[in-house]
Image (cartoon, grey):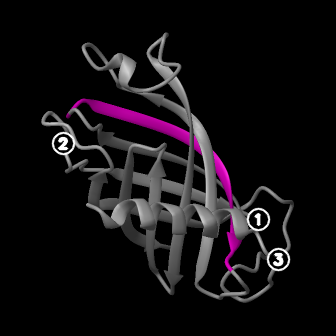
Amino acid sequence: MAGFPNALLILVGLLLACPIAADDNEFESRPTNGWSVDAWTLQTSLYTAHFDPEPEHVDDQNLLGIEAYFTGKWLAGLALFENSFGQSTQLIYAGKTWPLLDSRHWYTKLTGGLLHGYEEPYEDKIPLNGLGVAPVIIPALGFRHGYFVAEANLGGLAVIMVTAGVRF
């Protein structure tokens, strides 16, 4: 667990160093009206680690997510998972991706959305959850090659989740 603060600093540094503009085949969009869906991604969670683990934390989120990628690297998604306390949780979000350092495969992603599912007695474990729905911002570092996609997503300063999936 001692390596996680260093990994967190590296991930945050990479996210802040980007976006660096680069055009390549992997990230190139087809000419359309700007809101056509270029690709879909289905993903699941592989690994979760809490930076400050508590006995009641669950590290198996059983995430199932779907994202639509639009022209111009914009995206929208829905994720269904079990939160850190085993409660059924839903996240709806939108965001954007940027190629990382002229790479054809590595990218950064920043999404924001609404999170629902943190209920008693854990409703205060997520900020601004007064109405049962909280705003979230999730930075990620991703790798995409062909149909394969993998990402490391930061959940605030509390958790990192590694996901993998397919893009079609």
Q: Quadrant of the N terminus?
A: bottom left
166 shown above or below 34: below
Work out how far the residue at label 2 is from the one at label 3, CA to CA, in angstroms: 38 Å
Q: Quadrant of residue 148?
A: bottom left
162 shown above or below 111: below
User: Picture coordinates of residue 53 (x, y %)?
Assistant: 23, 43
Whether tag 3 and tag 1 are in contact, CB under 8 A, the answer is no
Q: Mark 3: few, some, or many residues within 10 Å (few <14, many ≥20)?
A: few
| Amino acid at pointer 3 | Ala
| Amino acid at pointer 1 | Thr
Residue found at x 79% / y 75%: 20
Instruction: Provide the residue designation for mark 2.
Output: 58
Work out how far the residue at label 3 is from the one at label 1, CA to CA, in angstroms: 15 Å
Q: Earlier in the sequence, mark 2 or mark 3?
A: 3
Q: Mark 1: few, some, or many residues within 10 Å (few <14, many ≥20)?
A: some
Which span is picked out in magenta? 86-100
User: Picture coordinates of residue 61 (x, y %)?
Assistant: 25, 47
Instruction: Provide the residue designation for mark 1.
Output: 71
Residue found at x 66% / y 84%: 26
Instruction: Provide the residue designation for mark 3.
Output: 21
Q: Earlier in the sequence, mark 3 or mark 1?
A: 3
